[in-house]
Image (tube, rainbow, N blue to C red):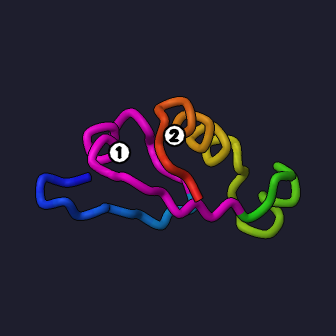
Amino acid sequence: MSSYNINIAVETCGFFNYERNIKSIKLIDTFLYDLKLISKDKHLIYTGKDNEIIIENLFKLIADNKRVI
Protein backbone atom coordinates (compact mmCIF):
# COMPACT_ATOMS: atom_id res chain seq x y z
CA MET A 1 0.00 0.00 0.00
CA SER A 2 1.25 3.48 -0.81
CA SER A 3 2.17 6.02 1.85
CA TYR A 4 -1.30 7.56 1.29
CA ASN A 5 -3.07 4.23 2.06
CA ILE A 6 -4.07 3.85 -1.57
CA ASN A 7 -4.03 0.35 -3.02
CA ILE A 8 -2.18 0.35 -6.33
CA ALA A 9 -3.38 -2.11 -8.97
CA VAL A 10 -2.07 -2.71 -12.48
CA GLU A 11 -3.74 -4.61 -15.28
CA THR A 12 -1.17 -6.45 -17.39
CA CYS A 13 -0.82 -9.17 -19.98
CA GLY A 14 2.49 -10.04 -18.30
CA PHE A 15 4.68 -9.31 -21.30
CA PHE A 16 7.39 -7.15 -19.71
CA ASN A 17 11.00 -7.26 -18.55
CA TYR A 18 10.70 -8.20 -14.86
CA GLU A 19 14.16 -7.11 -13.78
CA ARG A 20 13.90 -3.75 -15.56
CA ASN A 21 10.60 -3.04 -13.77
CA ILE A 22 11.42 -4.33 -10.28
CA LYS A 23 11.24 -0.85 -8.69
CA SER A 24 7.71 -0.36 -10.00
CA ILE A 25 6.69 -3.93 -9.14
CA LYS A 26 7.62 -3.33 -5.49
CA LEU A 27 5.15 -0.40 -5.36
CA ILE A 28 2.22 -2.33 -6.83
CA ASP A 29 -0.18 -4.12 -4.49
CA THR A 30 -2.34 -6.06 -6.94
CA PHE A 31 -1.77 -7.36 -10.45
CA LEU A 32 -4.81 -8.03 -12.63
CA TYR A 33 -3.16 -10.62 -14.85
CA ASP A 34 -4.57 -11.37 -18.30
CA LEU A 35 -3.18 -14.78 -19.27
CA LYS A 36 -4.83 -15.45 -22.60
CA LEU A 37 -3.77 -19.05 -23.32
CA ILE A 38 -1.68 -21.67 -21.52
CA SER A 39 -0.66 -23.44 -24.72
CA LYS A 40 2.54 -21.86 -26.06
CA ASP A 41 1.70 -22.84 -29.66
CA LYS A 42 -1.88 -21.53 -29.53
CA HIS A 43 -0.73 -18.34 -27.82
CA LEU A 44 1.73 -17.76 -30.65
CA ILE A 45 -0.94 -18.40 -33.28
CA TYR A 46 -3.57 -16.12 -31.74
CA THR A 47 -1.41 -13.31 -30.35
CA GLY A 48 1.74 -13.35 -32.47
CA LYS A 49 3.98 -13.89 -29.40
CA ASP A 50 4.76 -17.00 -27.37
CA ASN A 51 3.80 -16.93 -23.71
CA GLU A 52 7.09 -18.00 -22.11
CA ILE A 53 7.95 -14.60 -20.59
CA ILE A 54 4.31 -14.11 -19.56
CA ILE A 55 4.21 -17.35 -17.57
CA GLU A 56 7.70 -16.72 -16.13
CA ASN A 57 6.58 -13.29 -14.91
CA LEU A 58 3.45 -14.77 -13.36
CA PHE A 59 5.55 -17.22 -11.32
CA LYS A 60 7.98 -14.44 -10.34
CA LEU A 61 5.12 -12.29 -9.03
CA ILE A 62 3.76 -15.21 -7.04
CA ALA A 63 7.24 -16.00 -5.66
CA ASP A 64 7.54 -12.33 -4.61
CA ASN A 65 4.23 -12.70 -2.68
CA LYS A 66 2.38 -10.28 -4.92
CA ARG A 67 -1.40 -10.43 -5.07
CA VAL A 68 -2.34 -11.70 -8.53
CA ILE A 69 -5.87 -11.92 -9.81
**Where is residue 19, by image quadrant?**
top left
Q: Earlier in the sequence, mark 2 or mark 1?
A: 1
Q: Residue furthest left?
A: 4
Judged from the image, the secondary structure of the residue bearing numbered disc 1 is helix
Q: What label sits on residue 61 in the rendered view? A: 2
Q: Is residue 19 magenta?
A: yes
What is the CA distance from the residue labelled 2 to the residue labelled 1? 9 Å
The structure residue drawn at horizontal position 86% and vertical position 52%, both measured from the top left corner, is 39
| Tag 2: amino acid | Leu
Q: What label sits on residue 25 in the rendered view? A: 1
- Disc 2 vs disc 1: Cβ atoms closer than 8 Å? yes
Judge from the rendering whether residue 19 lies leftward or rightward of residue 1; answer left or right. right
The local crowd at label 1, few if under 14, some if 14 to 19, many if 20 or more residues have their Cα within 10 Å, is some
Tell me the magenta residue range.
14-35
Q: Is residue 57 magenta?
A: no
Q: Residue furthest top?
A: 63
**Where is residue 2, by image quadrant?**
bottom left
How many numbered marks have been drawn onto this rendered protein structure? 2
Judge from the rendering whether residue 64 lies leftward or rightward of residue 48; answer left or right. left
The structure residue drawn at horizontal position 69% and vertical position 42%, both measured from the top left corner, is 52
The structure residue drawn at horizontal position 48% and vertical position 57%, both measured from the top left corner, is 31
Judge from the rendering whether residue 28 lies leftward or rightward of residue 11; answer left or right. left
